[in-house]
Structure formats: structure tokens, C-alpha cells
């Protein structure tokens, strides 16, 4: 079986990027990305605030676990 490199290692260095059209360069997805990320951020913030509300006002037990919950959830740990 022969080995074929994905990127050729010739004297010229890495391959050149293909030329991109002005239409391709003018396309911008920033608005869509901000809409998706903003709505997900709002949902996660609302969930944490609702958790605080329940723990403080309804259960009246806001302990050390409530203090460490937002930083842990912001790091992606949902155990």
C-alpha cells in the first residue's frame, strides 16, 4: 500500500490558496451567528437565573453549591 500525503511537501512550501471571487468575500454570516449565539446565551442565562430564583425565594436554601454552579455550567460541565 502506497502512502499519499494529503499536502505535498515540495520545495515551494504549502500549496497556494485558490483565488476567491468578490461575491464569496462579500458574503457575511455575522448576523446569523450573532442571532444563534445570542439566543442560546439568553436561554442559558435565563435558566441560571430561574435556578437562582427557585433556590433563594422558594426553597430558601442557597448554599455553596449555588455559588459554584454558574462557573461550572459556563465551562460546559452539566453533571
Image (cartoon, rainbow, N blue to C red):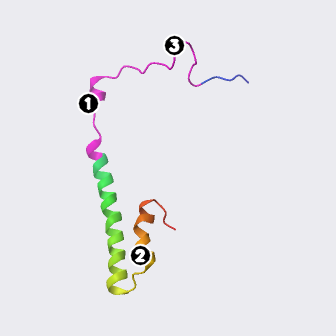
Is 11 magenta? The answer is yes
**Is residue 5 positioned above or below 32 on the image?**
above
Left or right, 45 with respect to 1, comes to left
Query: Which structural element holds mark 2?
Result: helix
Disc 1 versus disc 3: nearer the observer: 3
Residues marked 3 and 2 touching at CB (< 8 Å) = no
Residue at image coords 44%, 18%: 16
- Residue at the farthest top position: 11
**Is 9 displayed left or right of 3 in the figure?**
left
Q: Quadrant of residue 72?
A: bottom left
Check residue 69 for magenta coloring.
no
Circles 2 and 1: CB atoms closer than 8 Å: no
Q: Which residue is mark 1?
A: 26
Q: Which residues are magenta?
A: 6-32
Residue shown at the point (35%, 69%) measured from the top left:
47
User: Could you tell me residue 43's position as x and y percent?
Assistant: 33, 64
Chain-order first, disc 2 or disc 1? 1
Residue 21 screen position, x and y as percent:
31, 22
Dominant secondary structure, magenta: loop
> For the residues carrying marks 2 and 1, which lies nearer the camera in this image?
2
What residue would you read off at disc 3? 12
* Mark 1 vs mark 3, CA separation in Å: 30 Å
Indicate the secondary structure of the residue bearing disc 1: helix
Quarter of the picture holding the N terminus? top right
What residue is disc 2 on?
Answer: 66
For marks 3 and 2, give the CA distance.
58 Å
Residue at 34% over, 23% down? 20
Q: Residue at x 29, y 40 (%)?
A: 29
x and y, in percent, of residue 34 in the image:
28, 49
Amino acid at each position: 500500500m502506497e502512502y499519499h500525503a494529503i499536502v505535498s511537501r515540495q520545495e515551494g512550501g504549502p500549496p497556494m490558496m485558490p483565488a476567491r471571487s468578490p461575491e464569496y468575500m462579500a458574503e457575511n454570516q455575522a448576523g446569523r451567528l450573532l442571532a444563534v449565539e445570542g439566543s442560546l446565551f439568553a436561554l442559558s442565562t435565563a435558566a441560571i437565573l430561574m435556578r437562582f430564583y427557585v433556590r433563594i425565594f422558594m426553597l430558601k436554601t442557597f448554599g455553596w453549591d449555588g455559588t459554584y454552579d454558574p462557573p461550572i455550567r459556563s465551562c460546559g460541565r452539566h453533571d
